[in-house]
Amino acid sequence: MKPQIDSIAHSTDASMIEGKASSVIYPKTAEEVKQIIIAGNNITIRGGGSGLVGGAVPNGIVVDLSKMNKILNLDRQKKEVEVETGIILDELNEYLEKYNLEFPVQPGSHSICTIGGMIATNAVGNRAIKYGRTSNLVVALEVVNGKGEILKIGKAELADFSGMEGITGVIVKAKLKLVEKKKRSATLFSFNEIEKVIDAVRKIKLVKDVSEIEFLDKFCSSLLGLEEKYHLIVELESEAGKLKNEEYEKIMIMRDSVYPVLAKLGYTHIEDPKILLHKFSELANFLEAEKIPFFGHLGVGIIHPVFRSEDRKKIKEMIKLVRKLHGQITGEHGIGICKKEFLDNLEKKVIERVKLRCDPLCKLNYGKIIDLGRKDVEEKVEQIRAEKKEQEKVEEIIEEVRRVEEAREQVEDAEELVEEARKEVDDEKENVEEAKEEVEDEENKEQVEQEKEYAERSEESIEDIELADKQEQGEQK
């Protein structure tokens, strides 16, 4: 009977989307998680089941991490704690309180959400203006990926698992950065106009001790017993606020009760767009015109419009407006099942690459964020192969073109060498001609000299003959 009850209890999460759990397994070690992944398929990982977008809605085996809830080590000097990820946030902080420490990220579901779920969705929470996302305070992780490998993960690889909503691996251990527990107080502000709210937020964000700026619209304010005005609940990590001790606790409890109160009135579908502060008035005007109540973490631009179940068309219109205002469709809840239709192709491709690297057989959290199963993987592999072949053909053509270009360059180089050789031959010919002319000039010169010498000698001989003749005639006389 218990397995049947477990299957029914695990067939949905806080999104109230119905799934089907074929079986529920409660591992106690990373090695057990590894064996489940190696042996199983269609595995859904479950933490506290507090997600609002269907991230833990099953379609097969459910791996419930609630029994992996130990605090393994506390380093008070470094302000770090190592835990198994099935531990609930409030239980961890209750343990840390006696050491005057805390993990400060606080989603609205802090009483039931697990550390693993917070890391998997990269949760934000009320104090995001001070502490940011959960991943900001994660030092290291131990995960079991979709291949069944147990891995130690540092900051560099954190994004492969934090914010991936369990589609790449099961986070089984985490080392977290802590802060000293602060003595907190709060102040409540009221406004008649949205623009004055925006101006006030800009100024309040400059105050050093502010850790939370929560917004309530007029409808939510009146439901909680406040004036029908816009309100800001500002938390400070000091005693500078007007509401201290019991009054502070009371206003924080009132803030956490907003969604449950709205849900009782039929406003059950909560969204979480994130928008720039100077664009907030446009979104607020749309929501008020459509009579949609809204509240949220205005300090970081995360707004929670809450819809009735029949308001599906209004949700799409709101998301379209958020896109137009260059906002994000999710600020903290994640994509899950509910919002995957709003992802664009580039976002899907980025997620697919990480998924296939960490979980190539698509065993984990099928249908969350992206629709990628075994059949899809096979098609992707074929597509990649075809693209690879096409790329190889292109590369072959490019290589052939490169070879032709090299041959052309070589021919051009050879032509230049031939031309240089031809010039050298022509130059040599000119040199030979010049030399020949010089030789001829020299030979002519020598001939002239010889002829001159011969003429001179001839003249001398004639003179000698004439002289001898004269002498002979003289003698005869």
Image (cartoon, grey):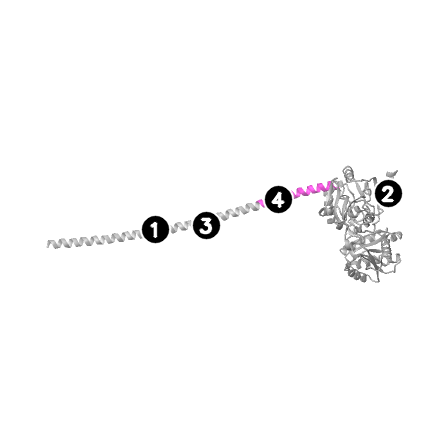
Report how many numbered discs are placed on residues in the image: 4
Circle 4 sits on which residue? 397
Q: Is mark 2 on a helix, strand or loop?
A: helix
Task: Classify the position of the N terminus by image quarter.
Answer: top right
Residue 269 appears anywhere in the view: yes
Label 2, residues with CA under 10 Å away: few <14, some 14-19, many ≥20: few
Q: Mark 2 points at which residue?
A: 9
Q: Is residue 21 magenta?
A: no
Q: Which amino acid does label 2 sit on?
A: Ala
Q: What residue type is labelled 4?
A: Ile
Marks 2/4: CA–CA distance: 60 Å
Q: Are marks 1 and 3 in contact (CB under 8 Å)?
A: no
Can you identify the residue that label 1 sits on?
440
Q: Which of marks 2 and 3 is in front?
A: 2
**Inter-mark Cα distance, 2 to 3:** 95 Å
The residue identified by callout 3 is 423
Classify mark 1: residues with Cα within 10 Å, few (<14), some (14-19) or many (20+).
few
Q: What amino acid type should be assigned to the residue bearing mark 3?
A: Lys
Q: Which of marks 2 and 1 is in front?
A: 2
Main structural element of the magenta stretch: helix, strand or loop? helix
Of mark 1 and mark 4, the one earlier in the sequence is 4
